[in-house]
Amino acid sequence: MTARRRATAIAGLTAIGVVAAGCLPAPATVEARRTADLYTTFVAVAAVVAAIVIGLSVFAIVRYRARGDETLPRQVIGNTRLEAVWTAIPLITVAVLFGLTVLVLNAFDDATRAAAGVEIRVTGFRWGWRFEYPAEGIRMEGVGRPGPEAYVPVGENIHVTLTGADVIHSFFVPQFLFKRDAIPGRLNEFAFTVDAPGRYGGQCAEFCGLYHSQMPFTIVAVSPADYEAWVAAHRGGGAGASASPGVAPGGSASPAASTAAGASTSPGASTSPGGSAAPEPSR
């Protein structure tokens, strides 16, 4: 491969890498926008570093390539000033990126410590999710697809207390650019503020067993007025999200629908901590 073709290939791969790194879901929360900005900064810095390193490498390959004679080029022993510069620049770059990362992480912690507009307790279990609104007396629970729907008001700080009932699960909404583990016996807290109304699909992101892929849920962001109307319609009872019918391994039937607080479940489903039900496997 000639030097020109090699340079073209390297430049093409670099461009593909930059484009691929920018393929993030559109951020849907205040916190996600901060994360997206941080990713963009990292990619921009990486692109500059790649351009410098690749550019100098290609220049050296082309400029000082063998020219058919055995004459050695001028030998350079060292340059203290130059070595100090190319040592200091990477150190400063890494320190700046580290500082920006700490600021973004602290912003997540600040949101968690801020006053909550809505408090939600989330429990992951095999093979579904439970969303409880303590102040409103609402519980949403779903097993299998399509999973439960949790309503939140736009523009308000949503405080989430997350745990697991049996094994480790993970709460992940791609457009939130955030993932947090649901660990049995431990309460993890985080908060988010959704920017615009919409439906934001989530999924368990920690392999938790046979039906791990059948654990979706949806965050439904609505206007404050619509949220208040939803709360008024479901206060004290909640509403169930449908679950896929099927037969669990061993013969137990999965629930045909998830339940609200105080409602009974189908055989084979348990709404108590540690309970589980198997949805129909995808085909």
Image (cartoon, rainbow, N blue to C red):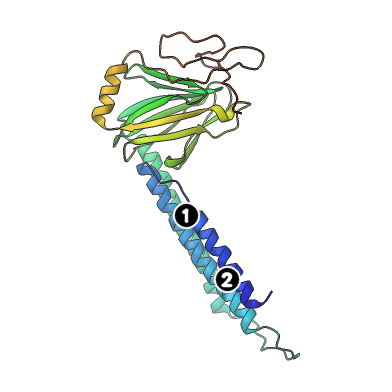
For marks 1 and 2, give the one nearer the viewer: 1
The N terminus sits in image quarter: bottom right
Write down the residue under mark 1: 22
Q: Amino acid at mark 2?
A: Ile
Q: Position of residue 224 (x, y in %)?
A: 25, 30
Q: Nearer the viewer, residue 106 or 61?
A: 61
Q: At 59% from the left edge and 28% from the top edge, which residue is drawn?
A: 282
The C terminus sits in image quarter: top right
Asked if residue 34 is positioned above or below residue 97 in the image, the reply reads above
> What is the number of callouts on the image?
2
Q: Nearer the viewer, residue 175 or 188?
A: 175
Write down the residue under mark 2: 54
Q: Quadrant of residue 241?
A: top left
* Mark 1 residue element: loop
- Earlier in the chain: of badge 1 and badge 2, it is 1
Residue, far left: 225
